[in-house]
Amino acid sequence: MNRRQFLRYSALGGLVLSSTGYVAFAATRKQLHGMAPAMFPDGGQPLQPLPRINNLSDTAGRFRSALAPAPHAVPLSDELEARLWLYNGKVAPLIEVREGDELDITLINELEQETTLHWHGVPVSQAQDGAPWDAVAPGESRRYRYTLPESSAGLHWFHPHPHQGTARQVAHGLAGALLVRPPQDVLPMEVEEHLLVVSDLRLTAEGEVAPHTAEDWMNGREGELLLVNGQREPRLDVAPGTTLRLRLINACAGRCLRLRLDDHELTLIGTDGGLIERPQPLEELLITPGERADLLVRVSEQAEARFWLASHPYGRGWMGDRPPHLDQVAPLLAIHTRNSGVQPAVTLPDRLGSVEPLVEPAVQRRVELTEVMPGHDDNNNSSMLHSGGGHDAAHGMGHGGAQAGDGHGKGHGNGNGHGMPGMAGRPEVDFLINGRAFAMDEILFEGQAGEVEEWEVFNNSHMDHPFHVHGTHFQMIATRGAEGEWRDAPWLAWKDTVNLAPYQRMKLRMVFREPGDWLFHCHIIEHEELGMMATIRVS
């Protein structure tokens, strides 16, 4: 498919972006980082569904289309536009498929820098993963093609993953949702489903995406515009007693979402890798960058009431001046009940999904996450990490524990990133895995496809780090706090991203089914880009 054909097809069903359907921001917001507040309209508009990517295939079981990341001007008001980078001109677009379908997507890079398409949480071969060493140059294209296997149902997503360019591209709005439906849904038809992609933006008064600050790089960027499906504080109108299925993606670069719903209990029914076995009632739920959550809520039977789904303050560790918004409740979605009859409660099946526990591991590894500020002796890291040593205590145990820099790299490129756009303002801080910053040509571990591995991941730092693994899902087996004992996980779930609080340890059990070089990293995008990423080579 050439570019002219793509543009003709993608125009069909394109999203019309308006000031009421996209980014609304109150004019009374305080200025941040020396920028004047923009005059954006207020929120409260009806929640809009995610704009869909069109299927250009006429063949059953095949989804064929193209994604063209490119600059787009999005109207915010009569006089102001936001200049973002979007796939096909759509904010948070959706691709919807089913297990067993073939996904055939051509990436057409219309940016002025290289990019990739990383299929976050999707079981693919390494050639389709969209890793940094498979970057697509400006003006070039690349085809991603794979079949979605059995048990791949769930809410996944896609975003760029170029070397030393991911943070800038995510900050400009590049992200989308990939919903994989099962052959048959186990939930009753009366359950009302909504997909929610949560993201944030920071714009200058002229509508440009503001450049990263030193605080962004150290902590992970948090924008002042907190958005749900590209809207600020949208409204969802439902009948009293409605059972909602809220399926969320945290597509923010650094913001953690500590979710609560006024006067309601949240029921977790699924995570990154799909449904869990039994519903888990929760008062609140923390969703860190990269994670997904599948929630059920039975809305109050009270008519003409309003309830806020909001993110509450969460102390994830902060370097530098603490911005005021960290201590404020951030509204996400207003749920309004109509003046109508009460919907009856729904009955859930006894078992939602199947999560079979992985057997005892053949390989055990240790992974340590640290941060180092050169020239400072009061870091929380040990002296051996300051000197670049200490790998005997940190590399994998058992066969396949190859030490970083051992000559096994396959020449993916260099790791310095000099000359890349958006590099200005980076502080003198290194985010490390096992004492090493990421390099494109280094392999930290070596493993075998099909073997059960258990990783003990230790966050030896003063701030949270969401830990993400490419190429597989894992089960959290046990966790240990800074001064506590090991505690078994309360339930089993398939995850690809999990948050580690400061000085917390987790035991994660996983199997890599596909050979290749697979990344694992902190999913605070700026920490990943400053070095907290490594590679395991699976044969």
Image (tube, rainbow, N blue to C red):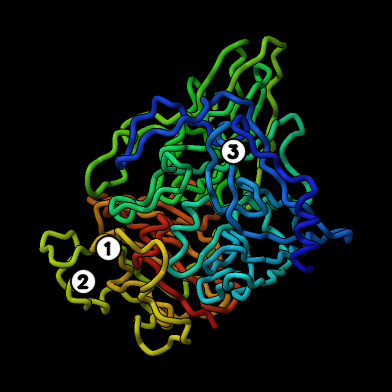
The amino acid pointed to by label 3 is Pro
For the image, the number of numbered tags is 3
Nearer-N-terminus badge (1/3): 3
Q: Quadrant of residue 22?
A: top right
Label 1 and label 3: CA atoms lie apart by 42 Å
Q: Which residue is mark 1?
A: 370
The extreme bottom residue here reads: 407
Answer above or below: position of 154 versus 535.
above
Q: Which residue shows up at 44% across the image and 50% down it?
A: 489
Q: Is residue 17 visible?
A: yes
The extreme front residue here reads: 79
Q: Is residue 265 visible?
A: no
Q: Which residue shows up at 61% across the image and 45% down it?
A: 91
Q: Is residue 66 left or right of residue 493?
A: right
The extreme left residue here reads: 377
Q: Nearer the viewer, mark 3 or mark 2?
A: 3
Which type of secondary structure does the marked residue at label 2 adopt? Answer: helix
- Find residue 334 and report its horizontal and vertical position in percent: 55, 24
Q: Which residue shows up at 62% across the image and 33% down it?
A: 21
Answer above or below: position of 74 versus 266.
below
Q: Which residue is mark 3?
A: 75
Q: Quadrant of residue 38?
A: top left
Q: Which residue is mark 2?
A: 385
The amino acid pointed to by label 2 is Leu
Q: Residues within 10 Å of mark 3 (few under 14, many from 20)?
A: many
Q: Are marks 1 and 2 in contact (CB under 8 Å)?
A: yes
